Image (cartoon, rainbow, N blue to C red):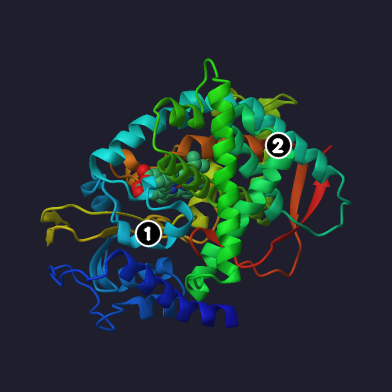
Amino acid sequence: MLAFAIFAVTFVVALIAAVVYFNPSGSSKRRSTVPGMDPTDPNEGNFPDMGAAGSLHEFLMKLHKTYGSIASFWFGKTFTVSIASPELFKEHIGLFDRPPELFALFEPLIGQKSIQYANKADGRKRRNMYDPSFAHTSIGNHYGTFNELAGELVQKLLTIPKDEHVSLMQHCHALVITALTRTSFGDFFKSEELINKFRQAYNNCWYDMERSLFQGLPVKGSDREKKFNKALGFLHDTVRNTLKECRANPTVGHQSFIDVLLENELPEDQILSDCVSYMVGGFHTSGNLFLWILYYLASNHDCQEKLHQEIKEVLGDGEVDNSNVKDMKYLRQVINEGLRVSVLAPYAARFQDNDSKLGGHVIPGGTPVMHALGVVLLDEELWPEPEKFDPERFSLANFTPRHKMGFQSFGFAGKRVCPGKYLSYAETSVFVAVLCRDLKFNLVEGQVVEKFHGLVTSPKSEIWFTLEKRG
Ligand code: HEM
């Protein structure tokens, strides 16, 4: 509880610092007819209300409950609109540009040159350049790696005695980090020692960034800042060395992310920023998805048995590949329901330069519009008993076009939806299928598992499992 009381206060401080940094003069106070909240404080806007709610996602849940599917609030001094319905999402489907001020907290880690802040022609050019290395066809080349990594984890888990309590978070994160670095950086990133060091440095940076939510940015020259800079320096050095090796030994055939960065002779600061941005985009999202799915399966043994049956029928003792993955329809339903109920990445955002119309209201040019993806994923009208894990929601018979527009965990607008979508589905399918074929997951009784909607939704504390070897 204490941690959350601290969070409530410091979340506000960190957001204010970030907004002032990106927008020192504050922005105009133009309003529109969109219903919503007045600022609680002339400078802080509704930050105190976000702190009281516990997170931006929980604040948006309350906001939309009170004002409906289009509602406004004040992000500091910035008038901001939020939308939360499949119909309103459709109205924003073509937009590309993202308001940088809402994502300012990531800046120390991903850098000013990050794709996260690249709009208009620059943003579109980068996406056109990078997307092919994460497209469906490219990801097809990585199934072998995913199977190999999942098999190694199974071997490790099989050595754990049946009644031992085991936390799977570290295992899930390690697997995903290894998969993403190998997929993105190719053969030059194979050493386990290097991957472990990279993971450690990445974790130091990530936890410092989450700490900024609690305690604000590190003081200049402090030990904390030095530790952060050292870890970030290691990530950058590793990328630089990988680039050097790639330059000396160009790959033929399949092009990974790093090959694309090299081939286009991009400035080094952009390469470093974008490499870290893709790692940040992919590590905790996919790692937590994997963990949440194991948790929901362990809490719902009927679903776990149905899934195990399907996996045995489709795979036997073989590997998951690009073609048989399509036959595991229930697995896909389980992944989709895991994405929905965990509310992994609760929002995206867009803006337009000129005045526009949305839900019948005029939206002044430059106004950030949040896509409250998480609010719609928990909308009772769309998903009855929204907190319940029920993969049947995604069966062919139950999943309508309206559900499809409401189920947008990877964003939906413009050519800027999450570039890691295919990679996440492919690796999660392999990891869950291989683990659930060989192991049965049980939850240690008496635990209360709660969500923490930080930068990505994580469990508030470790989740404890016991494991049984399948016959
Ligand atoms: C289950 C896993 C994931 C979820 C739920 C998720 C969700 C999201 C969401 C909601 C966005 C914002 C989209 C928008 O603005 O419309 C996004 C952007 C992004 N994601 Fe993911 N993501 C996941 C995995 C990944 C992976 C594996 C990668 C790495 C390849 C990645 C890299 C990125 C990047 C770089 C962006 C920013 C793209 C841009 O600015 O154009 N994500 N993600």
Check disc 2 and report the residue beneath it: 150
- Disc number for residue 103: 1
Kindly report which numbered mark, 2 or 1, lies closer to the viewer in this rendering.
1
In the rendering, at what x and y percent does residue 352 appear? 18, 52
Closest to the observer, 310 or 276:
276
Provide residue 361's location: percent of width, then percent of height.
Answer: 12, 61
Q: Is residue 96 left or right of residue 165?
A: left
- Binning the other alpha carbons within 10 Å of mark 2 as few (below 14), some (14 to 19) or many (20 upward) gives many
Helix, strand or loop at mark 1:
helix
Q: Single out the residue that lies furthest toward the front.
A: 221
Q: Looking at the picture, how far across and down is residue 411, in whole percent? A: 37, 47
State the mark number for residue 353: none
Instruction: Say which amino acid is labelled 1.
Output: Phe
Q: Is residue 394 visible?
A: no
Q: What's the residue at 29%, 56% (across, down)?
A: 85
Expressed as whole percent of the image width and height from the top left, the position of residue 116 reads 37, 49
Residue in the image at 40% along x and 29% along y: 265
Residue in view at x 71 percent, y 53 percent: 168
Callout 1: CB less than 8 Å from ligand 1? no
* Mark closer to the chain start, 2 or 1: 1
Three-letter code for the amino acid on which mark 2 is drawn: Ala
Q: Residue at x 61, y 67 (%)?
A: 460
Residue 435 lies, with reference to residue 368, above or below; the image says above
- The answer to which image quadrant residue 204 occupies is bottom right
